[in-house]
Image (cartoon, grey):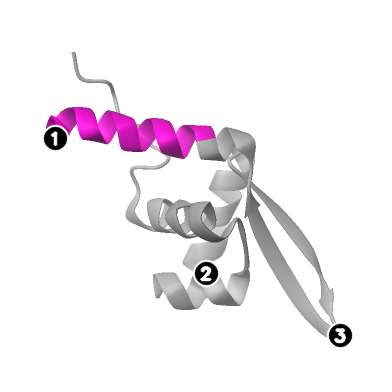
Amino acid sequence: MLKKLDPLLHSELRLAIMSLLISVNRADFKYLKEETESTAGNLSVQLTKLEEAGYIIVKKGFKGKMPQTVCSITKKGTEAFEKYVNDLKGYLNL
């Protein structure tokens, strides 16, 4: 029986964000925006959804005098991502 894919991770941008964070563990907003080629507004909305689910932690601060937002993946986020990948493999019979 095929498992239902996590709808939170099934979004292209949220999946891209999680894929990046799983490989680098933490990244700033600028890096995520450049790598995903998303708008600042859309990225911000998707980060909030991931944070509300407990998949990432978003920390806002300053680097010198410039505001900086840094995102990191949580254990829950790592487990959800790994489950999503495994469930997807089930669809592909891998």
Give the residue type at disc 1: Leu
Q: Which quadrant of the structure image shows residue 37?
A: bottom left
Image quadrant for the C terminus?
top left
Q: What residue appears at the point 65 percent right and 58 percent down from the top-left corner?
A: 71
Q: Is mark 3 in CB contact (under 8 Å) with mark 1?
A: no
Q: Is residue 56 magenta?
A: no
Q: Secondary structure at mark 1?
A: helix
- Residue 20: % across, % down: 47, 60
Give the residue type at disc 2: Leu
Callout in the foreground (2, 1): 1
Q: Residues within 10 Å of mark 1 (few under 14, many from 20)?
A: few
Q: Secondary structure at mark 3?
A: loop
Q: From the viewer's perspective, tell me whether residue 27 is left or right of residue 18.
A: right
Residue 88 lies, with reference to residue 42, above or below; the image says above
For marks 3 and 1, the one nearer the N-term is 3
Q: Which residue is mark 1?
A: 92
Residue 55 lies, with reference to residue 18, above or below; the image says above
Residue 41 lies, with reference to residue 78, above or below; the image says below
- Residue 4: % across, % down: 29, 24
The span picked out in magenta is 79-94
Q: What residue appears at the point 62 percent right and 40 percent down from the top-left corner?
A: 52
Q: Is mark 3 in CB contact (under 8 Å) with mark 2?
A: no
Q: Which residue is mark 2?
A: 32
Q: Is residue 81 magenta?
A: yes
Marks 2 and 1, how far apart in space? 28 Å
Q: Which residue is mark 3?
A: 64
Number of labels in the image equals 3
